[in-house]
Image (cartoon, grey):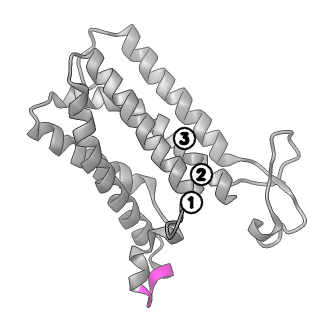
Amino acid sequence: LGPLVFRAYGLCTAVGVLAGVAVTQRRWARKGGDPADIAAIATGSVIAGLVGARIYHVITDWRRFDGHWFDVVKVWEGGLGIPGGLVLGVLTGVYLARKRGMHIPSALDSVAPALPVAQAIGRLGNWFNQELFGRPTTLPWGLEIDPVHRPAGYETIATFHPTFLYEALWNLALAGLLIAWDNRNPTARPGR
C-alpha cells in the first residue's frame, strides 16, 4: 500500500491481538469492570509484548546477530519469541492495571482465555510464511510446502504436518476449557 508493506503474518498477529482484546473486554465487563480499562491497558501491553518477544528471540538466537547487531531492530525480517512476549506483556498489563486500581486477579482471569485465542489466530501467519511445519506426512490435512521452503534433505517431499495448526487448535481448546471452568465455578476465588 504505497510505500508500506503489509505482511500476512503481521496481519494475522494484529487480528489476533484485536480478538484477544475483544474477548478480554467482554469477560471484564461480565465481572463488572469497564471495558475501556482493557483497551487502555492493551496498548502498553501489546507494545511491551512485541519488545519482549523480540528480546527473547535475540537471546535465544543470538548467533544470527553476531557481528550484525543492528539487525536486532529489523523485526520485519522475522523473529519473535512468544515466551518473551507473554512475560513482558503480562507484567506490563499487571503494572498498568494496578495503576488504574483494577483488581489484578480478576483482570488476569479475564485475560487468561484471550491469550490463547490471540495466539491461535496469530499462528495462521505461519501458513502464509510456510514455516513451523512438522515432519512429512501423507495425511489428508498435510500442508503442501513450496520447494523453496522445504528443509534440506526433504526437497522431494511435498506435504508436512501443519504443526502451527495443531497448536492453534490446542490454543482454542485451552481457551474453551478456561471459559468453561470459569462458567462452572462462578464463585471461585479470583486468580485461580
Mark 2 in CB contact with mark 1 (< 8 angstroms): yes
Among all residues in the image, which is located at the extreme front?
Answer: 2
Mark 2, Cα crowd under 10 Å, few <14 / some 14-19 / many 20+, is some
Q: Quadrant of residue 100?
A: top left
Q: How many marks?
A: 3
- Tell me if 24 is positioned left or right of 99 in this view: right
Q: Secondary structure at mark 1?
A: loop
In the image, residue 166 above or below residue 154: above
Read off the magenta span: 63-68
Residue shown at 74%/67% (left/top)? 149
Q: Residue 13: percent from the left, percent from the top?
A: 49, 49
Tell me if residue 143 is in the magenta stretch: no
Residue shown at 77%/66% (left/top)? 150
Q: Mark 1: which amino acid?
A: Arg
In the image, residue 9 above or below residue 138: below
Q: Residue 140: percent from the left, percent from the top?
A: 86, 39
Q: Read off the residue under disc 1.
A: 7
Res. 125 mark = 2
Q: Read off the residue under disc 3.
A: 121
- Tell me if 34 is positioned left or right of 47 in this view: left
Q: Mark 2: which amino acid?
A: Gly
Mark 1 in CB contact with mark 3 (< 8 angstroms): no
Residue shown at 42%/43% (left/top)? 17
Front residue (pair 79, 167): 79
- Tell me if 156 is positioned left or right of 71 in this view: right
